[in-house]
Image (cartoon, rainbow, N blue to C red):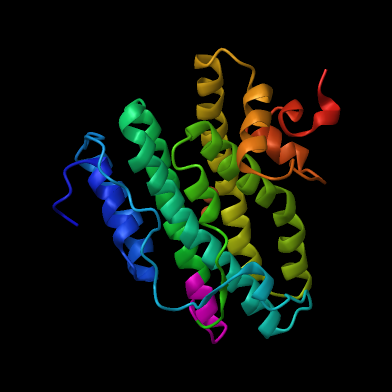
Amino acid sequence: MSQVTTIVEAALAVLGEGDAEKKAALSQSLAAVVTAQDLPVGPALLMPDRPARPSRPELRAPRHMPKRRKGGSAENRIALLHALAHIELNAVDLAWDAAGRFGPDMPRAFALDWIGVGADEGRHFQMLADRLVDLGSYYGALPAHDGLWQAAYDTREDLAGRLSVVPLVLEARALDVSPATIERLRGFGDDASADILDVIYKDEIGHVRVGAQWFFKIAEEQSCSAEELFDASLERFFSASPKGPFNVPARRQAGLPDSLYDRAQRA
Ligand SMILES: [Fe+2]
Ligand SMILES: [Fe+2]
C-alpha cells in the first residue's frame, strides 16, 4: 500500500482488498497518505466491475435474506448491526470507486471529497464490527444482502446517475430512517449501539452534501436544472422515485432542496 503514487492507484488498492477489516483500515490509512503526500489523481486505470469481498458473509439475493425482526433481543440487534456493517463496507468501495473511476475526468477536489467519505465509511464499518464483537458476534457471522453493488455497476459510466442513486437516494434514505432506529435502540437500553448510529447519522449528512454539491455542478455544466437531471437519471437507473416520509431538516442540512426529491414541492 505504501507504493501508491496516485489516487487512482489508492482506489484500486482499496477495491482489491478482500478482507473486510483490512479494507476498512486501508480506506482510512490511504486517505491519510493521499492528503499527507498530496498525491495527484493520476491517469485513469481499469476499475474492477466488482470489488474484492471476504468469503464470509455469505451473500444472498435480497429475497432470500431472513426477515429482520424489530424487537430488542441481542439476536435482533446483532442482525441490525450486521446489516449496517455490510452497508458500510459497501460504502467504502462506493466512495473509492467514485474517486478512482470518475476522478480522472473531474477536478481533484472531487476525488478528495470521496476519499474523505471513504475514510468515514471505513471508520463506520470498524465501529459496527467492534460492536458486533462486544455483543458476542462478528461481521461475517450472518448472511448479507447481495444487491448493494448493482446500483454502482449500473451507473459505472454515468456520474450523474451514480450521484443520483447512491448519495441522493440511498444515503439520503438512510437519513430518513436513522433517527427512529437510534431511538429504538435507546428504548432497548442499548445506548452503545445507539451512540454509534448517531455518529454515523451525522457523518452521513456530510456525505449527502458532497454528493449534492457535485451533482449540482454537473447539472449546471449540462445547462439543465438539478430536478430535470435527477428525474432523468432515476428514470434510467432506479425503478422508483424516492419515497417518504422524508427527514426534511436533515435533507436540508445536507443541501438537498425539497423540490429535488418531493415532486409535490415542485413549482
Ligand atoms: Fe457510513
Ligand atoms: Fe456514507
Query: Farthest residue toward the top?
Result: 223
The residue drawn where x is 42% and y is 50% is 118
Relative to 56, does residue 154 appear above or below in the rendering? Answer: above
Q: Quadrant of residue 39?
A: top left
Whether residue 256 is visible here, answered yes or no, is: no
36, 245: nearer the viewer: 245
212, 53: nearer the viewer: 53
Query: Farthest residue toward the front?
Result: 236
Whether residue 208 is visible here, answered yes or no, is: yes
Query: Farthest residue toward the left?
Result: 3
The residue drawn where x is 63% and y is 48% is 170
Q: Position of residue 153 (x, y in %)?
A: 48, 49
User: How many numbered callouts?
Assistant: 0
Q: Quadrant of the C terminus?
A: top right
Extent of the magenta region: 129-140
Q: Is residue 133 magenta?
A: yes
The residue drawn where x is 55% and y is 48% is 203
Compared across the picture, whether 256 is left or right of 131 comes to right
Compared across the picture, whether 223 is left or right of 179 comes to left
Q: Is residue 49 magenta?
A: no
Relative to 143, does residue 5 appear above or below in the rendering? Answer: above
Q: Position of residue 219 (x, y in %)?
A: 56, 20
Q: Quadrant of residue 254?
A: top right
The residue drawn where x is 76% and y is 75% is 188
